[in-house]
């Protein structure tokens, strides 16, 4: 049943609702790609779909503008699929359940997918005939952006002729993004040895951290649940010896972990429970951001059958002590930060521990520094790091005609000025610019909050203003 039509123009409302009903997790974009292909076919628009489920749809210019240079519009079709603790949702078979409160759109217990559903909805609206005047349009919907810009890296850009572009993958209406950092993912695992023996262990559970985007939110001081658990275990170790039984936390490569569960086998349960008696005091000494005010720590006894050796317990604690968060600020001291790293995920089996990190910086030598540190750590633990999903940073032209025109159109629509900035997150603009020399590109967004978390929400009035600005831009460009 339509629930957001009264807040938006008919087309963006209809298309946002339509794509929200389709499962579109990263690496599972087949259904949304089917939808895009059918959309193009029904309207007689030329399209191309590749093996990675990237979809390119082309729309001829309106009458009288056939000879003008084409314009590329771009958004990604996948979304981060985070689920609130205690909520049940199967992203393999279900889309999101939309809910509206006033001017705010959100999902029931999951991420909303406004990142990047808003961009898809705008592009589909234009392709559907929402713009009365526009040049030739090339609309590219890329796959697997959220796990390392994989889709755009596989796309054949010989199919694109445009040299001016609007990317719709930002989250603040009043900012034009003209640059972003690069990034790289690092994974490694190391072997562990377990010693058998039935006993009563202790399960420590951290829940309720705010989390967020591991680039755009990394400077906000929000706690990483994995790092906090590591600090708690090191504090406990000063009071009682223990061995780790299991450790689980984090999910998406580009999200700050919100939850963590560790099971340990203390040598003296009474001492361990005495230390953990005042969990609020423990957390208040480790967590400083008001965004994490709802976090909690619980401890309960559980039956265990084996545990890591003391040596391997120390190895895991070493991983949890690695540098995390912001490493270097920009030379001018302004936001966003220059270089950061996020411990995104820890998994444990009977035989090994595996970890995943995401490093970000506009400078390749900083990314190399982060990668070398993790390679050295992996080697010391008996493993080998794999560095992958590299993408370059992007610095747009200071005299961009595309940027100037968007500023003019936004001012005409809203009566307000819009400024430029760079962000500490990866955008596909960098990879696309490297494939299309001379590309004039900016990244745009509407107001979206708490991306990559179940608290994600979008201002509907903001989406409407961006849509109206887009129509004005297409008419004037």
Image (cartoon, rainbow, N blue to C red):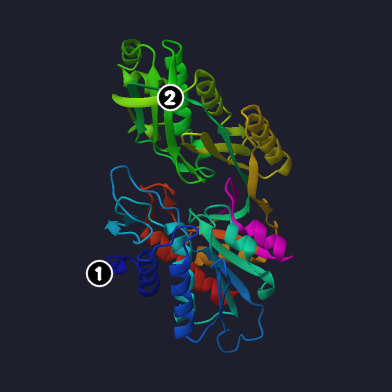
Q: Quadrant of the N terminus?
A: bottom left
Residue 427: percent from left, percent from top = 59, 55
* Residue ID at (45%, 40%): 250
The residue pinned by badge 1 equals: 1
* Residue ID at (70%, 58%): 397
Residue lying at the far front of the rendered structure:
196
Q: Which mark is residue 148?
A: none
Earlier in the chain: of badge 1 and badge 2, it is: 1
Q: Which residues are magenta?
A: 419-440
Residue 306: percent from left, percent from top = 40, 25
Position above or below: 334 against 82: above
Q: Name the one closer to the observer, 473 or 284.
A: 284
Looking at the image, residue 403 sits to the left or right of residue 453; the answer is right
Q: Name the one closer to the observer, 130 or 229.
A: 229
Looking at the image, residue 330 sits to the left or right of residue 49; the answer is right
The residue pinned by badge 2 equals: 307
């Amino acid at each position: 049943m339509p629930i957001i039509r009264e807040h938006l123009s008919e087309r963006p409302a209809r298309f946002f609702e339509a794509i929200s009903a389709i499962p579109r997790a990263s690496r599972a974009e087949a259904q949304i790609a089917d939808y895009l292909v059918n959309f193009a076919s029904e309207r007689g628009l030329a399209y191309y779909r590749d093996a990675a489920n990237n979809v390119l749809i082309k729309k001829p210019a309106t009458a009288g503008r056939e000879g003008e240079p084409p314009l590329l519009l771009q958004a990604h079709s996948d979304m981060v699929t985070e689920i609130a603790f205690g909520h049940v949702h199967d992203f393999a078979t279900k889309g999101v359940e939309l809910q509206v409160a006033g001017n705010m759109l959100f999902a029931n217990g999951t991420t909303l997918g406004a990142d990047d559903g808003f961009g898809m909805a705008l592009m589909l609206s234009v392709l559907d005939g929402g713009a009365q005047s526009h040049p030739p349009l090339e609309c590219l919907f890329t796959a697997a952006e959220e796990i390392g810009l994989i889709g755009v890296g596989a796309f054949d850009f010989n199919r694109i002729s445009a040299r001016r572009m609007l990317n719709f993958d930002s989250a603040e209406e009043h900012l034009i993004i003209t640059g972003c950092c690069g990034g790289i993912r690092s994974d490694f695992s190391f072997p562990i040895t377990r010693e058998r023996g039935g006993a009563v262990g202790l399960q420590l559970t951290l829940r309720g951290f705010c989390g967020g985007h591991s680039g755009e939110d990394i400077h906000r001081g929000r706690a990483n649940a994995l790092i906090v658990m590591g600090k708690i275990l090191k504090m406990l170790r000063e009071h009682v010896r223990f061995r780790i039984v299991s450790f689980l936390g984090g999910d998406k490569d580009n999200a700050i972990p919100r939850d963590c569960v560790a099971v340990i086998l203390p040598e003296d349960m009474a001492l361990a429970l005495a230390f953990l008696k005042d969990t609020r005091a423990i957390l208040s000494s480790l967590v400083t951001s008001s965004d994490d005010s709802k976090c909690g720590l619980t401890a309960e006894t559980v039956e265990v059958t084996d545990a890591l050796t003391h040596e391997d317990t120390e190895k895991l604690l070493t991983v949890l002590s690695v540098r995390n968060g912001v490493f270097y600020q920009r030379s001018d001291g302004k936001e966003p930060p220059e270089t950061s790293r996020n411990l995104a995920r820890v998994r444990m089996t009977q035989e090994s521990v595996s970890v995943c990190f995401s490093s970000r910086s506009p400078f390749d030598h900083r990314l190399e520094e982060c990668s070398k540190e993790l390679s050295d750590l992996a080697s010391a633990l008996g493993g080998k790091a794999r560095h992958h999903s590299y993408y370059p940073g992007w610095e747009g032209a200071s005299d961009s005609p595309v940027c100037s025109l968007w500023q003019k159109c936004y001012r005409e629509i809203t009566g307000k000025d819009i400024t430029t900035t760079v962000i500490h997150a990866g955008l596909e603009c960098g990879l696309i610019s490297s494939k299309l020399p001379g590309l004039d590109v900016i990244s745009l967004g509407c107001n979206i909050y708490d991306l990559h978390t179940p608290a994600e929400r979008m201002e509907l009035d903001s989406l409407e203003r961006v849509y109206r600005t887009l129509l004005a831009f297409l008419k004037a460009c």
